[in-house]
Amino acid sequence: MDIQLFQNSLKEKGINLTSEQLNQFALYFKLLVEWNEKMNLTAITDQQGVYLKHFYDSITAAFYFDFTKKYKVCDVGAGAGFPSIPLKICFPHLNITIVDSLQKRITFLNELASQLKLEDVLFYHDRAETFARKPQMRQSFDIVLARAVARMTVLSELCLPLVKVGGFFIGMKGANLTEEMDAGEKAIRILGGTIMNIQNFQLPLENSERNIVIIQKEKNTPKQYPRKPGTPNKNPIC
């Protein structure tokens, strides 16, 4: 996806990027490639691939959820900043918190935020399981995002404890979601969530399958969740 198609495709969805925002994406790409030579941030380093599979793909969440309000957002396992940093560029008013388990990625994100002159962004080096048990973080976010970092049963246990009652967990997934949701619905209910919407679509150009699951938090998450680090993945709620 070249830059012009990126801009036009977003415009068709009602997201009109300014020249400053386009410059931020250009600098993001430049820094991503430069830092990737020193550490493993992404396997995708060509410009068209980054703009499609990282930038555009991250922003697809905004096609199905209204990010125009001043939400407090947490991105769990964001890696090199996806999806929350592209969303932050498009919607500068968002208050973004990223938690990631690798310090080197947090180092990159701090430098990225500084270079892009992003405000209201915080980065934490932590496991999601321990982060969600901190009193100041637990059930404190309007929206929690996760982009394909684990199965829905696992993602729900990592993310829903961070969502305030009335808020939303948005899971961004690839193919084979149906079988994940069969197992994940019970976990979502136990953790206090209700599935509101599932959007299935194809990424432009390559036509790969994408799914966005929007879950609303309707009641408090039981105190025992999330369980200790590693347990959700080894022994998912079922």
Image (cartoon, rainbow, N blue to C red):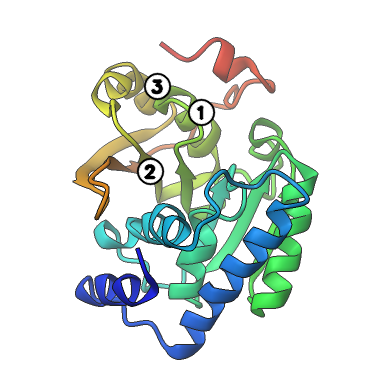
Q: Quadrant of the N terminus?
A: bottom left
In 3D space, how far apart are the residues under numbered discs 3 and 2 (Cα atoms)? 17 Å
Residue nearest the observer in this picture, 35 or 185: 35
Question: Could you say which quadrant of the image residue 232 lies in?
Answer: top right
Amino acid at dot 2: Met
- Secondary structure of the residue carrying tag 3 is helix
Q: Is residue 105 above or below residue 94?
A: above
- Is 87 on the left or on the right of 135, as rendered? left
Occupied quadrant, residue 64: bottom left
Check disc 3 and report the residue beneath it: 187
Q: Which residue is mark 1?
A: 157
Q: Nearer the viewer, residue 141 or 120?
A: 120
- Element assignment for label 1: helix
- Numbered badge on residue 172: 2
Q: Tell me the quadrant of the picture where the C terminus can be found.
A: top left
Which amino acid is tagged 3? Answer: Ala
Crowding near pointer 2: few (<14 within 10 Å), some, many (20+)?
many
* Among numbered discs 1 and 2, the one appearing first in the sequence: 1
Horizontal relation, residue 129 to residue 83: left or right: right
Mark 1 Cα within 10 Å, few/some/many (few <14, many 20+)? Answer: many
Residue 153: x percent and y percent?
43, 23
Write the residue at 78% across / 47% down.
104
Residue 56 or residue 193, whichever sits in front: 56
User: Is 97 placed left or right of 84 in the picture?
Assistant: right
Q: CA distance from mark 1 to mark 2?
A: 15 Å
Residue 159: x and y, percent? 51, 38
Amino acid type assigned to the residue bearing label 1 in the image:
Glu
The foreground one among 71 and 203 is 203
